[in-house]
Amino acid sequence: MMDIHQILKQLPHRYPILLVDRVLEIDKGKRIKALKNVTINEPFFAGHFPHRPVMPGVLMLEALAQTAALLAFDMMGVTPDEKTVYYFAGIDAARFKRVVEPGDQLIMEVELDRMKAGIFKFKARAKVGDQLAVEAELMCTMRTIA
């Protein structure tokens, strides 16, 4: 388990782009389960779409990537600093299966597939209840910046 205070120590993201509210489970080096409470107060809902608010698919993928970063940092026993950035290196097989709306709770499940030459590959999916909302294969890498 990891609450929002622990997440804020691990991820450099802040409002409005921090998209993980709580970590429910971590199986070190293998898998993580986290949640995002989706509320009508999210800034993107004002424009996406005013008549029918829907969470953008790219933000669901970003939430999964942030969850993957938490798994990677936990696995390596590191707390990133201002000189460390965790980037997307690729997204494959992304599929959107269900609309995510205000009031939904997005449960994100990310599993480490492999790590090679500093590139992490994850199998990721998010559900609302027992319904699959999005699934994808994510590739991420850590870089030190000047």
Image (cartoon, rainbow, N blue to C red):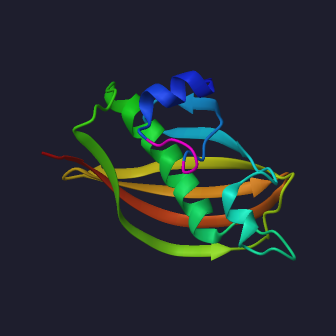
Q: Which residue is drawn at 66% across and 69% down?
A: 56
Q: Looking at the picture, tell me which residue is in the foreground, 89 or 84.
A: 84
Residue 145 is situated, as x and y percent measured from the top left of the image, at 17, 47
For image coordinates 55% across by 53% down, the residue present is: 64
Which sits in the foreground, 142 or 94? 142
Against 56, residue 76 (above or below) is above
49 relative position to 114: left or right: right
- Please give the range of residues in magenta: 13-17
Q: Main secondary structure of the magenta part?
A: loop
User: Residue 123 at what x, y percent from top left?
Assistant: 51, 57
Number of numbered discs = 0
Residue 15 is one of the magenta-drawn residues: yes
Residue 1: x %, y % from top left: 62, 23
Q: Does the magenta stretch include residue 105?
A: no
* The C terminus, quarter of image: top left
**Which residue is found at the position 68% from the left and 57% from the top?**
43
* Residue shown at the point (65%, 37%) measured from the top left: 21
- In the depicted view, which residue is nearer to us: 19 or 130? 19
